[in-house]
Amino acid sequence: MPHRDESVETIQREMTAFARRARASAARTHPELSLVSFTLLSHLEDRQGCRATDLAAHYLLDKSTVSRQVAALERLDLVERRVDPDDHRVQVLHLTAHGVATLAQVAATRRSAFEERLTGWDEADLSRFAAYLLRYNAAAERLS
Amino acid sequence: MPHRDESVETIQREMTAFARRARASAARTHPELSLVSFTLLSHLEDRQGCRATDLAAHYLLDKSTVSRQVAALERLDLVERRVDPDDHRVQVLHLTAHGVATLAQVAATRRSAFEERLTGWDEADLSRFAAYLLRYNAAAERLS
DNA sequence: AGCAAGAGTTGTATAAGCCAACTATCTGTT
DNA sequence: AACAGATAGTTGGCTTATACAACTCTTGCT
């Protein structure tokens, strides 16, 4: 059993390596939808619509970045804006039908890439790995 | 115990969330050394020197990108090049003394951020988590 | 009425990345 | 020995993602 520090070191290195590669491989497998766009669309689906400001806060992005990303997604007919009738400053963002379909398709491809990397893992290991990631990210979110 | 598909789904979602945040938070905590630069320097330390091509392959970067990154790191006196006497096409990259010191300092800050997120984990969980990440990344590398 | 705060957009600058074209070196085949 | 093809790295040109700052419009409070 490795010592605590070694494990922390490995976790740090491997998480970073993963982060480093994720964007590049996402760009390769899905030239039509960057990792950022994908996560924004996922968030919209998850929350059943939200404001640009919420996206910025959740992903630590500047609001101008989100504004431009959303504009691009709207141009691609993946997202639509609905002005909040109670507060005309606010635009609630929703997936379009096309957005839902595209997201589903990209998600499926991504899932199969993950599955490929996880072949040979038994169910117990998968569920423990998933649990560790959840635990880690929950702590990261709490501390950020 | 969750079903296999659920675990894969969770792993995908959580790894992606991590990747999405990593760059932003790295940029905030270490404006002096981007996540990319940091990982390149770490790799050099780890391997005790390597070629630009190896960096490109390992991180799925274009060789031109690595070339410019390395040039920048050299300008900052963090990295030096040594032409391979056996093959004059090759430049073996090494950390300079300043590079070693800078890396150590940034690594310490990063490590403490990771440790903060991993407080309360016992040693067995840490070492299992580390092993899972290694296994996952090895598969990702093999398949890319 | 007036003003501060919030939501979003736009101007500007920078960094990171890719592709393609190039040089220099090496290796294997004839 | 000579040439062809492969490999390492650099450079030019372009695109995209991002941040920061300045702006508009709306809202809510005094």
Image (tube, coloured by chain):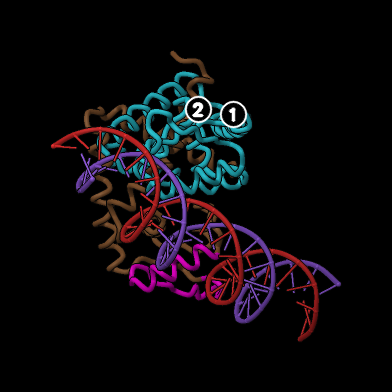
Chain colours: A cyan, B brown, C purple, D red
Q: Out of B88 and B101, give the one closest to the viewer.
A: B101
Please tell me how many numbered marks the rendered image carries: 2
- Near mark 2 (Cα within 10 A), the count class, few <14, some 14-19 or many ≥20, is some
Lower position in the chain sequence, tag 1 or tag 2: 2
* Whole-number angstrom distance, CA of label 1 to CA of label 2: 8 Å
- Marking on residue A100: 1
Q: Which residues are magenta?
A: B64-90
Quarter that holds the N terminus of chain A? top left
- List x then y, in percent, for residue A74: 56, 41
B60 lies above or below A103: below
- Marking on residue A124: none
Residue B23 in magenta?
Answer: no
Could you tell me the amino acid type at mark 2? Glu
Disc 2: which chain? A
- Near mark 1 (Cα within 10 A), the count class, few <14, some 14-19 or many ≥20, is some
- Mark 1 touching mark 2, by CB under 8 A? yes
- List x then y, in percent, for residue D13: 61, 71
Could you tell me the amino acid type at mark 1? Val
- List x then y, in percent, for residue B64: 54, 65
To which residue does mark 2 refer? A45
B31 lies above or below B81: above
Residue shown at the point (50%, 41%) measured from the top left = B138
Residue shown at the point (27%, 51%) measured from the top left = B29
